[in-house]
Image (spheres, coloured by chain):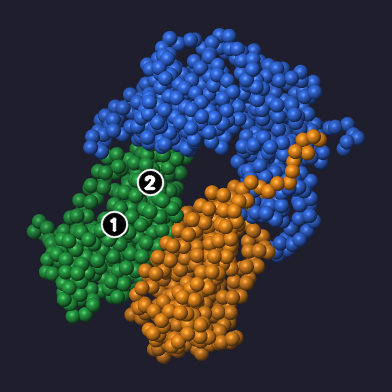
Chain colours: A green, B orange, C blue
Amino acid sequence: MSDETFITLLVASVAVGLFVVASVSVPNFFQPLTMLNLVTNNWAVISLGVGVTFLLVSGNFDLSVGGVVALSGVLAVWFAQSPDGANPLSTGLGFPTWLAIVCALGGALAIGGLNAFFVVRLSVPSIIVTLGTMMVARGIAQVITQGSQRNTNLPDDFGMLGNLTMFGTSVKLPVVLMVILVVVAVFIEKKTVFGRLTYWAGENAVAARLSGIDTAKHVTYLYLFSAAIAGTVGILLASEFKSGFSNRGTLMEFDALVIALLGGVAIAGGFGSVVGMFFGALILAVVTSAATGMILSPDWQFILKAIAVFLAITTQTWALAWRHR
Amino acid sequence: MTVMSHISVQHPASTTRGDHVARFLRNYYIYFVLVAVVVVLSVANLDRFDLFERGNFLNPSNIINILRVSAPLLTLAGAFTLLMVSGYIDLSVGSAMSLSAVVYALLAINGVPFLAAFGITILVGVGLGAINGFLVARLKITPVIATLITLSLYKGVALLLVQDGVSAIKSGGGLSMPGWFNSYGREGVLVGLPMAFWVAVLVTIVLVIAQDRTLLGKYAAATGGNPTAAKLSGINTTRIVFLLYVIVGVSAALAGIARSSFMSLGDPLSGDGMELSAILVVLLGGTAFSGGEGRVLRSFVGALIIMALTVGMLTLVPAYYQTLVLGSALLAAAASNHLISRKEKAS
Amino acid sequence: MTGQQPSPVLAVDGLTKDYPGVRAVDNVSFSVEQSTVHCLVGENGAGKSTLVKMLTGALRPTSGSMRVGGSPYEPSNPSDARAGGIATLFQELHVVDELTVQENLTLGMERSRFGFLVKSDLDDRVVRTLAAIEPSIDPSARVSTLSVAQKQIVEIARAASSGASVIIMDEPTAALSEREVERLFAVIRRLREADVTVIYISHKLDEIFKLGDAVTVLRDGKHIATKKLSEVAGRAELIEMMIGRSVLQTYAPRSTVTDETVLAAEGLTSELLKDVSFHINRGEIVGFYGLVGAGKTEIARALFGADRVSGSIRFKGQSVGRSPKGAIASGIALVPEERRTQGLFTSLSIRRNISVMNTRRLSSGGVFRSSDERAAAVEYVQKLSIATDSIEKYAEKLSGGNQQKVVLAKCLFADADLLLLDEPTRGVDVGAKTEIYDIIRQLADAGTSVAVFSSELEEVLGICDRIFLLFSGSVQAEVTNGPDVDPASILNVVTGGGAHAVQ
């Protein structure tokens, strides 16, 4: 069993263990709907976690995803709003919905490109770059929405994607897309050359270069990949709420990083998996929803996240040391 | 002895023009930027003036206003510089600042006298810094992760200290803030500037001296410049790093006091984003991300620039441009820092 | 001290260091007199660096003892060594670029009151020490503005002013120009005048004759001799002692060498390399032999495109040398000098290491064919007899020799027509060494060209058909291997003795 499988199993058993504890001790927790909600309520963060996980495995941070969620949503709304609004915030560019979505994704990819340019070409530490682009992305969204939101004068079909329910159930399209994304990401990670390149680049950049890998190009792809996911999430959220809100996605970059860390992804690069990240998300979901179930104030979530990440990092370090003793 | 005659006094090969240019840029460009920002703001059309007096940007009351709101960032800049010089970072400063602000306001509103409230809040800052220092220096958790953990932790505690349904600690419900609470950050005590500003200046002076005259300053540079050499020279880098985190914690507490006093409430979100501003001013001041290089005073000037820009901008464009401008400034500072470093290496 | 009978400042008695399966240092005893420059020579693998590591406290001896100034000396870390009066100048510099020269000189020794730095005689002393050994360095200059040679001198001055009575210098001239070497020598002589003892390790025999008072020769971990240099008859005697009569000539001429030029390099020039030209034929094993700093790695990396140099490199008629990626695509693969940091993905399994240079062979449409991938890993594990119970084992967990075989497997898997092997058997046990040599011969027999970059004479004499002798960045001579090649004359060339008299 590889270290990665070991850590993933560890994370999965913690998730299951917490779930059992929560089911026993929290009233009304053990219900099919609650369990389903653990996943469906977190589709956005889990989706972002996929891109963030790949980047962490390659040895880079991406804290810009929350900003990109806001930007792409706002852009999509602005592009789609009809041009004859009564005031600036209800006046858009009047693109057909599909074109608005494509252009909004373009905006998201531009932020990804900016990340890649600063990290790869200028070798600025990724944490600083993506903090900067997080602000730039959200800043543009704030300028377009004048610091609030755009939610009027939208074509009817704009709200379709985010509210489409699937297979005759209450499960919405974004959740299904998230599941597909996770499955595809696991496939890419485990089975494809692209996935392997990510590990090689993150594990030993020097050896990767001397083995003929264009690390710069690969990291560029990863930033674009992550921005595309974040852009899609932003558009879906904008569609779901039929609004472009400049504060949407606040702290999502933080949560995406948290679930990756809970899932055993190492920030040093070369170690971690999407499956681990998924279970990390479940841990966080169980903890926060159990806390809500016990009628703790929602303010507790910050403390719980801090404790969870701290415990995750220390136990994972100890577990690996114990395994290699 | 024939060999000795070969040795002539010669300039080191690497002291080239490029090196001098890079050094000069790193040392002084920040002052040119300050002048440029002030000039631009002064000549710009200030029609949209609502916060400040109409007319000249260089109006004394404008300057005083800017310096007044600048106190928290000015307080943080120096300590944050020393920490980054040693090659470390603290993303929790904003939360630490919020938590201190809430604690200070709680103490004040419950009738604790000024000096006691002030002292207790600073002790809280010591504690918050010590937790960071413990996680990073002792447990060896990567600084970014360790301080993201505490960012969340301190923020959560700050939010919990404020009652449900209330956004901040402030006068009301039978309790009211004492008079001194507000005056610390607002009322002029010297050339029209409040205590909070003078404390920021004092902190900066202390840290400039610490950087130039104490073991701490020198060892911080050695730790960031060449950690192996520092350790081989017998320097206890763990202790240096711990101490620097504590100093940042104290600065965050002082910044929190200044902010809550200025706003006359204890807002658990008041420090949000402060870590970004701190990184921005430190990079603007020419501190290298790789550690070893950076000056407290230049970051102080960097903080003045950012505040002048932020406040000045409010007079020109709507407030919702702020995030975009600050983010762009952060990227620009990072890029120029990179260019200077490359110039230094190339020479 | 000058009037007195010199007493040994450092005495080593019966020092032994065992590694699993290897005795790196074997019962070595010698003493070093005060205020001398004592040289330590020996071929690669003779035990010099292990000995130095024991002196500096980085390694504990298996048995034996050391005495400094007559009292027992048992360092367990570099600080202990420093406290015992022994300072070491490593090849990697330990100065803080961002501080001034003077700040570096006093680093860790400052006088302070309540944490505040106070002026003391220390500042004057370090400045005086620096001025005494190298007056041209300005104490107020920032170290980042100094050259490598000047930084080295700053480190020496720091060691001297910290009260070290012995300074160990390990290949200090490897990165220096000739002019800088002269300056360093002057510094060392002044140190000697100031009653500091220098233990000087170098491959460059001229330096040793120019500088040294005494010399200790090690061979295969054993102490061969400690002599005054005035009593050494010359380079020939020293070389004789270094190689003994034991250089095994296992080379058998190979019949598959062709005359077809595969690679031709013309006028390669960089900071270190000086107009290097050579060619390599198909099916040939070519050696590049030289000591530390002679330019071996630089040539290997230039051919592979990892560093840019001026000059032309043509491989099978095409111009190469622009990027590793391009080199691999045109059929060149490199086994780098440092396998752990440059060659291997230590926290990935053997299977996940092997495919890196040629993913196309195992994938269709960007997707790995899992069974092929496993089969390939199993095949190469068997082919190179990598000792492991599973292809899923982490590279980290393998022994040095097996790790090196994984790196080699990576390159073989790339189907390269030219293999560049930089120190292919460094840190590899004897058994694996022989196996690696066999693999190299088999490859060449099958038509692959191999370039071996090595600082071990036995290695190049054992397997190479042709050998280029390098000294300080240029090719000094080309030797066709055969029974009448004289190891002593080769050693003479690569230690700076000039190109005459080979063959």
Which type of secondary structure does the marked residue at label 1 adopt?
Answer: helix
Is residue C429 visible to the viewer in this orientation of the structure? Answer: no
Q: Position of residue C495 (x, y in %)?
A: 65, 24
Q: Is residue B259 left or right of residue C63?
A: left
Residue of label 2: A216
The residue marked by circle 2 belongs to what chain? A
Residue B122 image position (x, y, % from top left): 55, 73
Amino acid bearing label 2: Ala
Amino acid at dot 1: Leu
Secondary structure of residue under mark 2? helix
Please tell me the numbered disc located at residue A109.
1
Query: How far is mark 1 from mark 2, CA to CA?
Result: 17 Å
Tell me: residue C203, above or below residue B208: above
Counting from the top left corner in percent of width and height, residue B211 is at 63, 64
Sequence-first tag of 1 and 2: 1
Q: Chain of mark 1?
A: A
Number of other residues with Cα within 10 Å of mark 1, as a class: few under 14, some 14 to 19, many 20 or more: many
Which residue appears at 68% of the width and 52% of the height? C101
Direction from residue B245 to residue C335 in the image, left or right: left
